[in-house]
Image (tube, rainbow, N blue to C red):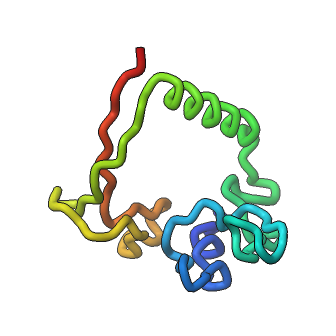
Amino acid sequence: MVPSWLAHTDEEWSTPEHPARSFWAERFLPSKGPGDSGTTGTTPKPGTYFPFGGGTSMCPGRFFAKQEVLIAVAIFIWKFEVEFVEFIAMDGKKSDRGPELDIRNVGAGAVVPDRDLRVRLRRRG
């Protein structure tokens, strides 16, 4: 089993605005260079981003899985309006910050966030 969490939270990914352990999806997008709006020069190096494992044990369904996720997200966006309400702690109380990784679960196969996000969904037409 490849411990991808270790590589994906390496301090090499950190920027002043986005620590490596906080969620920032643009971190793995290639930057176009100085002045690029979005990424800040954190282009992944080969062998540092591997969400489906690697080597002989690489997930054989990875291409199908990617297509399934894209279709599910497209249908969700098509059918619902999503409105941000607030961040909440795991006890249900309002939080002043967004979720971060809860490192108490490292080694359990998945690392979960330490708080959640409350949204309002409205079904479209």
User: Height in image: 59 above or below 44?
Assistant: above
Front-most of residues 28 and 16: 16
The quarter of the picture where the C terminus appears is top left
> Would residue 54 be found to the left or right of residue 103 on screen?
right
Residue at position x 60%, y 60% from top? 25
Query: Does residue 51 appear to the left or right of 22 in the view shown?
Result: right
For residue 1, above or below residue 13:
above
Q: Position of residue 106 (x, y in %)?
A: 45, 72
Q: Position of residue 99 (x, y in %)?
A: 37, 65
User: Which residue, as the protein is rendered here, is positioned at the far front?
Assistant: 35
Residue occupying the point 29% across, 59% down = 87
Outermost residue toward the top? 125
Q: Is residue 43 above or below residue 121?
A: below
Horizontal and vertical percent position of residue 70:
64, 35
- The residue under the point 28% across, 55% down is 86
- Left/right placement of residue 57 relative to residue 118 reads right
**Image location (x, y in percent) of residue 92:** 17, 56
Relative depth, front residue between 15 and 35? 35
